[in-house]
Image (cartoon, rainbow, N blue to C red):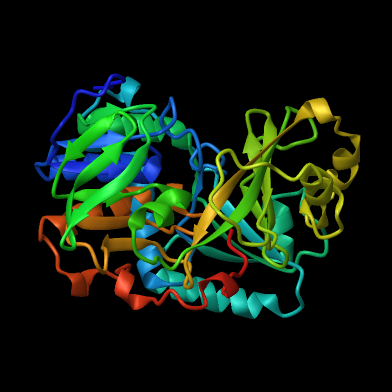
């Protein structure tokens, strides 16, 4: 239920943020028996960070806890009708098993890739493959002769993150307050009393802060987060772009692309200076030329982009930018705030929010309801310190 003229005065739990992280929080908390109120400052759900993402999901991580989180999330997306209880026509987020290919031209990389694949298989990903250069080009003929090795998982892919957000919110039955800005989390004696918004106050003893880049402003206590701008470029349909390609990641530089509606979605997690939360996030107009024409851009491993990139006109390109909420170890923050009883933090996915939010929301609900304890939570806040956060960024795909 959406309520634009706020009439809600009390709630079991208030969730701040209407992106995929807030939506998953609402869904799993509702499943746990709570009645959520979700507050979003924009006029639509998933209109900020979620909308600007690459909408891609992969389980190819190194850390066992990340592998488990992403594997569970992918399975959730694949089974949305079953999990949400909505009819299949209303619970289709467009999940595509398009695959993820991490390719390298570095001499000797096949050994490192084989070791990583062995590790991933040992932690629940039996379908990850290590490929040598000739096998890469046999399966994906558009790849450059310089590629010597790659890892590939066909079970990874992409979806429509905005649709997934809307589905989870609908299935939660949450009351949604749109175009409503949270001005303050009200506290007394270190306990949450509610939230104050520009449309009035909502009393509650339980608040979930899932406001992405704005979480640090509202938390009222330090969070180990760095905000970094990231770009997404959508290329209009072109015959040169293989529609059956996987997400293709240059493992040496980080530039990556995948098919998108006959064209492509292109991104590159190049280092950028940390900054304050922004809405909207202004993109760098030089990004398209950089990712399409730079020698380390997407053309390095896929030669057709070397010809196609310079030929694309501005009318064929759509550029957007969002902000990653990056933690020092690039894992999310899920758990109770350090200094405020009743405040729970759910943010810091470091560019992997759509990938991990379904499992993260389930974990959050289990923690809040006592199904599991803090010791069983690999993403608890007290694993980190705030000091040094801004200087600890590395490439995130």
Q: Quadrant of residue 27?
A: top left
Does residue 124 appear anywhere in the picture?
A: no
Q: As displayed, is residue 55 above or below residue 383? A: above
- In the image, residue 176 lies at what x, y percent? 28, 29
Given residues 56 and 272, the one toward you in this image is: 272
Residue found 44% across the figure and 30% down from its top: 42
Left/right placement of residue 96 relative to residue 242 reads left
Left/right placement of residue 367 relative to residue 97 reads left
Residue found 32% across the figure and 69% down from its top: 381
Q: Quadrant of residue 34?
A: top left
- In the image, residue 16 lies at what x, y percent? 32, 43
Does residue 331 appear anywhere in the picture?
A: yes
Residue found 42% across the figure and 57% down from its top: 216
Q: As displayed, is residue 201 above or below residue 344? A: above
Given residues 284 and 66, the one toward you in this image is: 284
- In the image, residue 24 lies at what x, y percent? 30, 43
Location of the C terminus by quadrant is bottom right
Left/right placement of residue 265 relative to residue 369 reads right
Residue farthest to the front, as pictured: 188
Residue found 85% across the figure and 55% down from its top: 294
Left/right placement of residue 211 relative to residue 297 reads left
- In the image, residue 139 lies at what x, y percent? 67, 51
Given residues 96 and 171, the one toward you in this image is: 171
- Numbered-mark total: 0
């Amino acid at each position: 239920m959406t309520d634009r003229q706020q009439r809600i005065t009390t709630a079991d739990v208030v969730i701040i943020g209407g992106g995929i992280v807030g939506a998953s929080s609402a869904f799993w908390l509702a499943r746990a028996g709570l009645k959520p109120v979700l507050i979003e400052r924009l006029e639509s759900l998933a209109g900020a960070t979620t909308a600007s993402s690459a909408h891609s999901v992969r389980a190819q991580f190194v850390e066992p806890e990340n592998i488990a989180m992403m594997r569970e999330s992918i399975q959730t997306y694949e089974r949305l009708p079953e999990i949400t209880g909505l009819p299949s026509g209303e619970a289709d987020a467009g999940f595509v098993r398009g695959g993820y290919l991490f390719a390298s031209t570095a001499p000797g990389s096949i050994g490192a890739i084989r070791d990583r694949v062995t590790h991933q298989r040992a932690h629940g990903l039996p379908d990850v493959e290590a490929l040598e250069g000739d096998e890469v080009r046999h399966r994906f003929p558009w790849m450059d002769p310089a590629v010597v090795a790659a890892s590939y998982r066909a079970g990874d892919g992409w979806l429509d993150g905005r649709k997934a957000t809307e589905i989870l919110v609908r299935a939660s039955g949450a009351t949604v307050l749109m175009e409503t800005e949270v001005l303050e989390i009200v506290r007394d004696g270190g306990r949450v009393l509610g939230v104050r918004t520009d449309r009035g106050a909502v009393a509650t003893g339980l608040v979930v802060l899932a406001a992405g880049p704005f979480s640090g402003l509202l938390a009222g206590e330090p969070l180990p987060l760095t905000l970094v701008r990231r770009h997404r470029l959508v290329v209009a349909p072109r015959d040169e772009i293989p529609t059956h390609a996987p997400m293709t990641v240059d493992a040496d530089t980080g530039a990556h692309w995948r098919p998108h509606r006959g064209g492509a979605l292109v991104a590159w997690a190049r280092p950028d200076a940390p900054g304050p939360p922004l809405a909207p996030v202004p993109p760098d107009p030089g990004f398209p030329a950089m990712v399409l024409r730079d020698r380390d851009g997407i053309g390095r491993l896929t030669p057709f982009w070397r010809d196609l990139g310079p030929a694309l006109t501005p009318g064929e390109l759509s550029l957007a930018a969002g902000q990653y909420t990056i933690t020092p170890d690039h894992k999310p923050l899920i758990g109770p705030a350090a200094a405020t009883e009743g405040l729970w933090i759910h943010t810091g996915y470091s560019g992997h929010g759509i990938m991990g939010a379904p499992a993260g929301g389930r974990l959050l609900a289990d923690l809040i309801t006592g199904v599991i304890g803090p010791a069983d939570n690999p993403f608890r806040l007290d694993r980190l310190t705030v000091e040094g956060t801004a200087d600890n960024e590395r490439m995130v795909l």
